[in-house]
Amino acid sequence: MVDHRASGAPRLRRTRAVLAGALVLGMGTTSTLAAWSDGEYGTGSFTASTFGTESQTASSSWASRTPR
């Protein structure tokens, strides 16, 4: 007599492992998306600035470069 349950055991084990892995990945994705979708917003203001630079080479004195 042939036991049909024994021949399908590796296939069932593989199927269960794949489903368990999908469940873990799905729960991780769900918790990550839930953490990223909060309703808090921030504001800020950004401005540009102008600054001058100073430099000196070995053969010259200090030079100032200020943009206009």
Image (cartoon, rainbow, N blue to C red):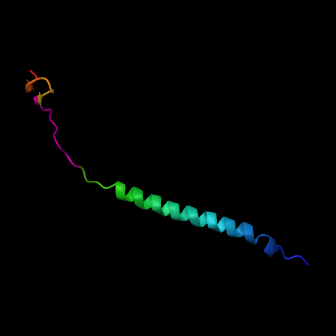
| Percent x, y of residue 50 | 11, 29
Residue bounds of the magenta highlight = 42-53
In the image as oriented, which residue stretches furthest toward the bottom? 1
- 6 is within the stretch colored magenta: no
Q: Quadrant of residue 9?
A: bottom right
Residue at the image position 14 percent from the left and 35 percent from the top? 47
Is 50 above or below relative to 2?
Answer: above
Residue 57 lies in what quarter of the image? top left
- Image quadrant containing the N terminus: bottom right
Q: Is 34 located above or below residue 45 in the figure? A: below
In this view of the protein, which residue sits in the foreground, 65 or 14? 65
Give how far across and how far down residue 28 sits, in percent. Answer: 46, 61
Residue 10 picture location, percent across and down:
73, 69
Q: Residue at x 62, y 63 (%)?
A: 18
Magenta stretch holds residue 49: yes
Q: Is 13 placed above or below 55 here?
A: below
Is the stretch drawn in magenta largely helix, strand or loop?
Answer: loop
Residue 38, given in percent of the width and then of the height, sits at 31, 56
- Residue at 56% x, 61% y is 22
